[in-house]
Amino acid sequence: MKARNFRYIRPASLAQAYQILEDAGGDAVPVAGGQSLLAGLNMRLSAPKLLVDIGDLKELTGQSHACGVVRLGALTRHAELLRSDLVRRHLPLLVQAVPHIGHIAIRNRGTLGGSLAYADPAAELPACAVALGATLVLGSRAGEREVKAEGFFKGLFETDLRPGELIVAAKFPATAAGMCVGFAELSRRHGDFALVGLAAAMTIQHGRIGDAKLVYFGCVDRAKVARTVSAAVAGSAAPLRDTKTLDEAIAQDLAPDDTPGLRADTKLHLAKVLTHRVLNSLSERAA
Ligand SMILES: Cc1cc2nc3c(=O)[nH]c(=O)nc-3n(C[C@H](O)[C@H](O)[C@H](O)COP(=O)(O)OP(=O)(O)OC[C@H]3O[C@@H](n4cnc5c(N)ncnc54)[C@H](O)[C@@H]3O)c2cc1C
């Protein structure tokens, strides 16, 4: 199938992009890397009248680090995250996660902002943003506002973005000394979307887990902290001995549905396997 007809415009400045998006009302959608949007258009899942290509907007690029916060422009491509010294030094969770996103060609085009805005429940970056406590900078003609990543993801492919608004940047707290991050996912083949995945951030000191944020993807409707699991883990000695309590907490937080080719109980089993795998490797590294 091919996309329905649409008009295409590539504004040269952020102010111009905001103006175009506002004037078009609900008829325009932004396109960044096009790796999710264009497939959807070709499958006729949506048929916008106007595509606003934000690829030239310098205001959405750049990486910086100040006062313990790493700011990444929305147009930062997945491949750039892997090449970035700032990311390697201060956001090791992203370095673990990004190689799992699709294939090289997709990582060369796909952007951080596009992945967050698309809010695919099987995507790696939304889960990492929530686990790391990121804040998203959203902009429109009305100005900018900041939203915590956890409040940004509202449901399946649903976010807090308002009509005419763009993700400008994501701000991540730099991972502090003493903070441990872990990532794992299971997919049918490397590069496929995750069946089940886990991004985790926690402190481990003297063999004991402190604050913990565990965020699953692929088996939930959106990126959110698995509260019962995170509470079950916090305060425990690492490695965990009481696996029964942890497994019950996972079942309580996830409650996945059957989907074609994958039963809910299989997803739950995979989530438990991944959780133990990530926690054990973090305990070993902390020791
Ligand atoms: C074969 C294949 C495999 C893939 N595998 C994975 C995978 O394993 N994991 C994964 O996470 N992703 C995967 N992807 C998706 C890929 O990571 C996309 O690049 C990403 O989800 C969207 O980024 P984009 O820049 O391409 O966004 P686009 O496709 O351009 O846009 C996606 C959506 O976000 C909106 N948007 C884009 N930028 C902004 C912005 N700054 N502000 C507001 N709205 C914006 C668009 O309007 C659109 O609705 C895969 C894609 C393909 C084709």
Image (spheres, helix red, strand yellow):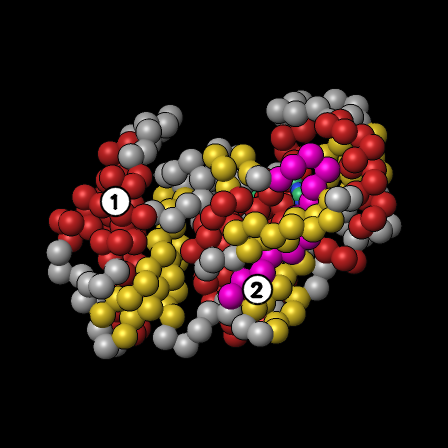
- Please say if the residues under marks 1 and 2 sit with CB atoms less than 8 Å apart: no
Q: Give the mark nearer the N terminus: 1 vs 2.
A: 2
Beta carbon at label 2 within 8 Å of ligand 1: no
Measured from the top left, where is residue 61 in percent x and y? 72, 59
Residue 162 is one of the magenta-drawn residues:
yes
Residue 178 visible in the picture:
yes
Density class for disc 1 (Cα within 10 Å; few <14, some 14-19, many ≥20) is many
Quadrant position of residue 194? top left
Which residue is depicted at the point 31% across and 39% down? 254
**C-alpha separation, residue under disc 1 versus residue under disc 2:** 31 Å
Quadrant position of residue 266? top left
The span shown in magenta is: 161-173
The three-letter amino acid code for the residue at tag 1 is Ile
Measured from the top left, where is residue 99 in percent x and y? 50, 57
Residue at the spot of label 2: 82
Which residue is depicted at the point 43% across and 56% down? 131
Image disc number at residue 250:
1
Q: Nearer the viewer, residue 188 or 204?
A: 204
Measured from the top left, where is residue 205 in percent x and y? 27, 75
Residue 99 visible in the picture:
no
For residue 93, side relative to residue 232 (left or right): right
Which residue is depicted at the point 86% across and 50% down? 12
Q: Is residue 142 above or below residue 60?
A: above
Ligand 1 is found in which quarter of the picture? top right
Measured from the top left, where is residue 285 in percent x and y? 30, 73
Q: Nearer the viewer, residue 18 or 31?
A: 18
Image disc number at residue 106:
none
- Prevailing secondary structure of the magenta residues: strand
